[in-house]
């Protein structure tokens, strides 16, 4: 089999890239290790920046997002037992974010890909990438017990943090920067109305909590837990009890609880691999970088990579220009490091650090007070949250 771009991974990065390339008339095949149902069962991001919603529109998959997504013009910061609204709209000159789950983004992209009849191989086994330092890269994989070879012009590594593409780069060709945080997020999805119509990011003496949502009837909540915790050791009751204790009196009172539809623990990490191009193989999304989810940046940074990568390939095929390809890594990394900085800062501000001590808490309290009192500081938070300009 032969194609122009072989895409590894059918997460949001791979699917969005496939759709944008298809719109530009560039043939592509996606190879995904898991089944489509498994990909859709992973509950992840919830907040989309304007850059991301624009790109979904450009890819022709924005209709349901505009019907069912929830535009948010602000969120609450909760600390010292009180809530303070960050008015994104007024602080950023009219910008907002869209609350629409990654699962739904993925579902819309899968449906569009299927409707266009584009080739996707799910449950592709033992995917391996070859000869990407030559003009003739190859991808090999197994399906139903038989081996297959895919010849291509380019390989797009959209295969997430644990993928095969970054792992196949020769040692010494890539530099990795990493910070692992000493806690994780225990998340619960439930068919209960959200405790508040906007998100609440809480810094409490018991640790961070986040009240998010997927719709008027579906909520997503998170609490900071030690890395040693296991999701199966948390009953629903224990989760709701812990969440309640981290909220303000009003939210504690109005929180509606119910059975969890999903419960899992995600570790928190900051990670960047540089560069993101290796000959004719390119990394995009979580394959190249991870942020802690506090700033809601992961999927949005992935979308920007995909925007730059699809325009680089389009330039290559329509104008025979290598300019976009040559600048891809540098262009992405400029934005990625700003997203990394913001996510690290917001994580550091909102979580309890095991070795932070009493002074750590006092310094956080002072910074939070400054953040809501100073328009300059609130503006810096708001402009990063809605997404810095491209
Ligand atoms: P994904 O989603 O990990 O998809 C990679 C795909 O590649 C497949 N794969 C392979 N396929 C073939 N062969 C192999 N050898 C393969 N190895 C892997 C995998 O099966 C998978 O299907 O990466 P992608 O597409 O780059 O998308 C990135 C996003 O998923 C991620 O950045 C966000 O979910 C991060 N994130 C958030 N981002 C936001 O922008 N806003 C948010 O509000 C937000 N909240 C979150 C988050 C991530 C979280 N977790 C669980 C880490 C909240 C949480 C809790
Ligand atoms: C989510 O709804 O899953 C979510 C929202 C905001 C974040 C992280 C996750 O910062």
Image: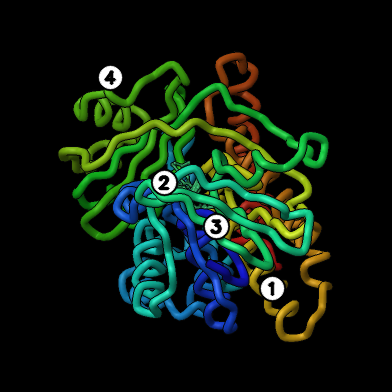
Tag 4: Cα neighbours inside 10 Å, few (<14), some, or many (≥20)?
few
Question: Mark 3 sits on what residue?
Answer: 149
Q: Nearer the viewer, residue 56 or 389?
A: 56
Question: Mark 2 sits on what residue?
Answer: 200
Q: Residue at x 28, y 19 (%)?
A: 233
- Of badges 4 and 2, the one in the foreground is 4
Q: Label 4, label 3: how many angstroms apart (C-alpha)?
A: 44 Å
Question: Mark 4 sits on what residue?
Answer: 233
Q: Label 3, label 2: how many angstroms apart (C-alpha)?
A: 49 Å
Q: Is residue 23 visible?
A: yes
Question: Mark 1 sits on what residue?
Answer: 313
In percent of width and height, residue 380 lies at 68, 54
Of labels 4 and 2, earlier in sequence is 2
Of labels 3 and 2, earlier in sequence is 3
- Of badges 1 and 3, the one in the foreground is 3
Q: Residue at x 56, y 61 (%)?
A: 150
Of labels 4 and 3, earlier in sequence is 3
Quarter of the image with the C terminus in it? bottom right
Image height of 260 relative to 322, above or below = above
In percent of width and height, residue 302 lies at 58, 57
Tag 1: Cα neighbours inside 10 Å, few (<14), some, or many (≥20)?
many
Tag 2: Cα neighbours inside 10 Å, few (<14), some, or many (≥20)?
many
Disc 2 secondary structure class? strand
In percent of width and height, residue 104 lies at 35, 62
- Asked whether the beta carbons under mark 4 and mark 1 sit within 8 Å of each other, the answer is no
Is the CB of mark 1 within 8 Å of ligand 1? no
Image height of 242 relative to 124, above or below = above
Q: Quadrant of residue 125?
A: top left
Q: Residue at x 61, y 54 (%)?
A: 157
């Amino acid at each position: 089999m032969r194609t122009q771009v072989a895409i590894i991974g059918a997460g949001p990065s791979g699917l969005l890239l496939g759709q944008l390339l298809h719109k530009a008339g560039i043939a592509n095949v996606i190879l995904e290790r898991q089944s489509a149902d498994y990909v859709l069962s992973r509950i992840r991001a919830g907040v989309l920046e304007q850059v991301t919603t624009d790109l979904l529109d450009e890819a022709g998959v924005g209709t349901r997002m505009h019907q069912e997504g929830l535009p948010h013009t602000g969120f609450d910061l909760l600390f010292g037992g009180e809530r303070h609204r960050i008015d994104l709209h007024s602080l950023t000159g009219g910008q907002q974010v869209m609350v629409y789950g990654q699962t739904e983004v993925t579902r819309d992209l899968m449906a569009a890909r299927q409707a266009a009849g584009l080739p996707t191989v799910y449950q592709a086994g033992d995917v391996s990438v070859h000869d990407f330092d030559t003009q003739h890269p190859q991808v090999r994989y197994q399906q139903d017990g038989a081996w297959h070879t895919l010849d291509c012009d380019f390989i797009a590594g959209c295969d997430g943090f644990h993928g095969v593409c970054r792992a196949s780069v020769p040692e010494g060709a890539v530099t990795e920067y990493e910070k692992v945080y000493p806690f994780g997020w225990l998340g619960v999805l439930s068919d209960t109305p959200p405790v508040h119509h906007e998100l609440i990011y809480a810094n409490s003496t018991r640790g961070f909590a986040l009240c998010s949502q997927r719709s008027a009837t579906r909520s997503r909540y998170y609490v900071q837990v030690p890395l040693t915790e296991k999701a199966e050791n948390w009953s629903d009751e224990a989760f709701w009890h812990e969440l309640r204790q981290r909220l303000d009196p009003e939210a504690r009172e109005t929180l509606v609880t119910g059975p969890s539809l999903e419960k899992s623990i995600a570790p928190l990490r900051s990670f960047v691999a540089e560069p993101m191009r290796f000959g004719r193989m390119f990394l995009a999304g979580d394959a190249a970088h991870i942020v802690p989810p506090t700033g809601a940046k992961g999927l949005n940074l992935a979308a920007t990579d995909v925007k730059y990568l699809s325009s680089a390939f389009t330039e290559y095929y329509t104008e025979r220009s290598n300019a976009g390809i040559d600048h891809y890594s540098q262009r992405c990394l400029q934005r990625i490091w700003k997203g990394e900085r913001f996510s690290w800062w917001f994580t550091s501000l909102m979580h309890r650090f095991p070795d932070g001590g009493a002074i750590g808490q006092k310094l956080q309290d002072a910074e939070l007070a400054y953040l809501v009192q100073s328009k300059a500081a609130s503006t810096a938070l708001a402009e990063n949250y809605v997404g810095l300009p491209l």
